[in-house]
């Protein structure tokens, strides 16, 4: 049913302008990235108010998460996917605008930042904080995947499904490959993250201050990385060395993340008993 194919020709640049010989660009990816953070901050601020936490702590938390997301995602891509080439040109590590962010790296970066944040705040245990953070991380991830769609990057494998996209602007594909109908993998993940956001909001609203510590974090880890493992079968590999692997790097990194998620859910069940809360 190729007659339903969507020819995706979206321009990743919204507009550009000239300033003193330079031509800065405003891109959809950057706008969507920022939108995710702003909306996430508003939601987290409301949760902070419900929980009666210090406003100064909230500002420090937001700053930590923003820095950890960008730094972690960038270093994750550099280390997990293309370390050899980046070591040849270390300066390119800082060229974030050229693309190259890894969700597994962002996850690690955020967890490290939250651990450092919680060390000085005994009233905010690590699992308590992470449970609230993953709500807005799910929302932010949805916007990031939409940004990937606007960039025509992280594209799916060729397919004949009725909703296939032709990513004719994809710079990572050859002249022939970019005109093949493909799975809109970015859209699949964006929809999945939007559903996860709604699930986490629903669970939080059910328990609020009595949310068993680790419950939301565990749900996030199992849901996100289980789907990531299976979505990778529909996506083109990001770097050439993955062609020689039985499963790609995204899948390799997802396996321990899912296992960790189940362990965290186990801890959440024990915390629920301590808090005298029935998980339904």
Image (spheres, helix red, strand yellow):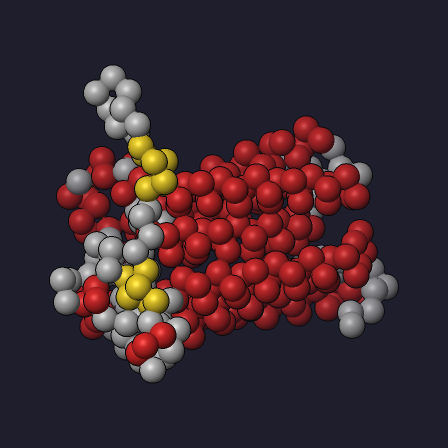
Is residue 32 toward the left or the right of residue 198 in the image?
Answer: left
Report the quarter where the C terminus lies: bottom right
In the image, residue 225 above or below residue 14: below
The reply to whether residue 133 is visible in this rendering is: yes
Is residue 182 toward the left or the right of residue 28 in the image?
Answer: left
In the image, residue 16 above or below residue 142: above
**Marker count (numbered):** 0
Q: Position of residue 41 (x, y in %)?
A: 61, 40
Find residue 56 and report its image quarter: top right
Is residue 42 toward the left or the right of residue 98 in the image?
Answer: right
Residue found farthest to the top:
20
Front position in the image: 156 or 248: 156
Front position in the image: 81 or 12: 12
Q: Position of residue 144 (x, y in %)?
A: 45, 51
Q: Position of residue 155 (x, y in %)?
A: 31, 63
Residue found farthest to the bottom:
1
Q: Residue at x 52, y 66 (%)?
A: 192
In the image, residue 98 above or below residue 222: above
Report the quarter where the N terminus lies: bottom left
Q: Residue at x 52, y 50 (%)?
A: 140
Q: Residue at x 49, y 51 (%)?
A: 143
Front position in the image: 165 or 219: 165
Residue found farthest to the front:
3
The reply to whether residue 257 is visible in this rendering is: no
Q: Residue at x 13, y 62 (%)?
A: 175
Front position in the image: 176 or 258: 176
Q: Position of residue 244 (x, y in %)?
A: 20, 72
Find residue 168 and report its image quarter: bottom left
């Amino acid at each position: 049913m190729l007659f339903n194919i969507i020819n995706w020709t979206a321009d990743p640049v919204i507009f550009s302008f000239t300033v003193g010989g330079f031509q800065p660009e405003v891109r959809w990816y950057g706008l969507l990235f920022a939108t995710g953070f702003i909306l996430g901050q508003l939601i987290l601020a409301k949760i902070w108010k419900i929980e009666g936490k210090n406003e100064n702590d909230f500002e420090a938390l937001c700053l930590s998460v923003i820095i950890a997301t960008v730094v972690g995602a960038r270093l994750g891509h550099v280390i997990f996917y293309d370390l050899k080439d980046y070591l040849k040109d270390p300066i390119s590590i800082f060229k974030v605008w050229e693309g190259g962010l890894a969700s597994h790296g962002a996850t690690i970066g955020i967890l490290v930042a939250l651990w450092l944040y919680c060390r000085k705040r005994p009233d905010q245990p690590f699992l308590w904080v992470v449970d609230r953070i993953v709500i807005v991380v799910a929302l932010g991830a949805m916007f990031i995947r939409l940004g990937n769609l606007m960039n025509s990057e992280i594209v799916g494998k060729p397919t004949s499904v009725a909703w296939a996209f032709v990513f004719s602007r994809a710079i990572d594909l050859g002249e022939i490959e970019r005109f093949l109908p493909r799975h809109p993998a970015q859209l699949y993940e964006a929809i999945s993250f939007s559903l996860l956001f709604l699930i986490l909001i629903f669970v939080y609203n059910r328990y609020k201050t009595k949310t068993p510590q680790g419950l939301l974090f565990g749900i996030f880890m199992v849901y996100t990385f289980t789907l990531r493992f299976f979505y990778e079968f529909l996506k083109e590999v990001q770097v050439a060395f993955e062609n020689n692997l039985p499963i790609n790097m995204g899948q390799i990194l997802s396996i321990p993340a899912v296992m960790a998620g189940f362990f965290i859910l186990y801890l959440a069940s024990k915390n629920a008993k301590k808090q005298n809360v029935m998980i339904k």
